[in-house]
Image: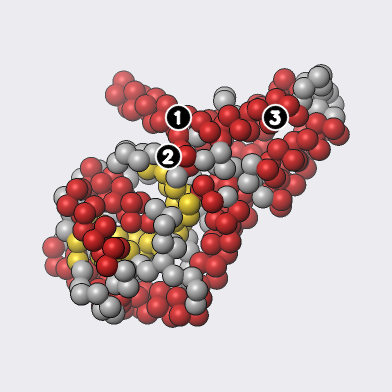
Amino acid sequence: MGFFGKLFSREKKEKLDTGLQKTKEGVWSKITHAVAGKSKIDDDVLDNLEEVFITSDVGVETTLKIIERIEARVKRDKYVNSSELNRLLCEEITELLADNHHQEQNLDDFEVPKTGEPYVIMVVGVNGVGKTTTIGKLAYQFKKAGNKVILGAADTFRAAAVEQLDIWGERVGVPVVKQKMGSDPASVAFDTLSSAKAQGADVVIIDTAGRLHNKVGLMNELTKIKNVMKKVVPSAPHEILLVLDGSTGQNAFEQAKQFVAATEVNELAITKLDGTAKGGVVIGISDQFKIPVKYIGIGEGMEDLQVFRREEFVKSLFGQ
């Protein structure tokens, strides 16, 4: 890696540190309190740590796994000084996340596989989580990486959704395929992929309606969209990306459950981490659902959607 590659990585790390500042401050202060006056990691420290992670929206099941790992480490190493706790937490949480996924994808430059057909990403998630903004930022990053990108406005139930996608399309300089309000979302997806194929596009990103009040209806609609897309690109969709709002903490877990039940989600994007102290939810969701967190949103800017790197994320969280 040359000088500019290193510089870019350093800039990204600084953005990550800044974006996670609120969570970091919250977790740090709680951990400092948990080990106050302790020279080694004992049962009291472990009990306090359990409370730290549960109140940081890591989730009960994942918290218990982390505590078990720390307990085993303390037992193995015999005497572990409380000053080493952050390093231990970094190592054990990174390993926990690594256990859940086969390998971390090397997508710093937002490349996509070149197969001669468009790479299709179907984006799902409830309204208000930053779904359309995430699509816009993805389009920007893919285009910046040299890809030809087309967006599909298949959320035909809200005029605001189509308008918002249009605005992002103009801002980024990518075309948006749309139909009139109330049109069949599957028809929009079909048109988008047909257009993408005709134009030799590299990436297609399809927005979908974010309704959860009727899970059966949602399931049927998403299945129909997928089936129609396969008529144009048989391997589509390559990604079903669920967007979750990190600032909602435990509510994000519930949304993930609902969408995982409704469709075959295979990637996650967790947004709005810069404005919350609930960034621990990334660890819990990644662990509980065994679905890779692919992107994290750490700010408003176009560059503030990053590929999730578990080791860098955990290091940022614990100030390593």
Choose the circle earlier in sequence order: 2 or 3: 3
**What is the secondary structure assignment of the residue under circle 1?**
helix
Under mark 1, the amino acid is Thr
Nearest the camera: 29 or 205?
A: 29
* Residue pointed to by mark 1: 18
How far apart marks 1 and 2 lie (CA) works out to 8 Å
Image quadrant in which you'd find residue 93:
top right
Assess whether mark 3 and mark 1 are in contact (beta carbons under 8 angstroms).
Answer: no
Q: In this rendering, is residue 191 above or below 176? A: below
Residue 144: x and y in percent read 23, 42
Residue 209: x and y in percent read 37, 69
**What is the secondary structure assignment of the residue under circle 2?**
loop
* Residue at figure coordinates x 55%, y 67% from the top left: 258
* Residue pointed to by mark 2: 298
Residue 234: x and y in percent read 31, 73
* Residue at figure coordinates x 32%, y 73% from the top left: 157
* Residue at figure coordinates x 54%, y 51% from the top left: 248
Judge whether residue 29 can be spotted in this image.
yes
Is the residue marked by circle 3 packed among few (<14), some (14-19), or many (20+) residues within 10 Å? many
Nearest the camera: 287 or 99?
A: 287
Assess whether mark 2 and mark 1 are in contact (beta carbons under 8 angstroms).
Answer: yes
How far apart marks 1 and 3 lie (CA) works out to 20 Å
Under mark 3, the amino acid is Ile
Q: Is residue 246 left or right of residue 200?
A: right
**What is the secondary structure assignment of the residue under circle 3?**
helix
* Residue at figure coordinates x 29%, y 24% from the top left: 4
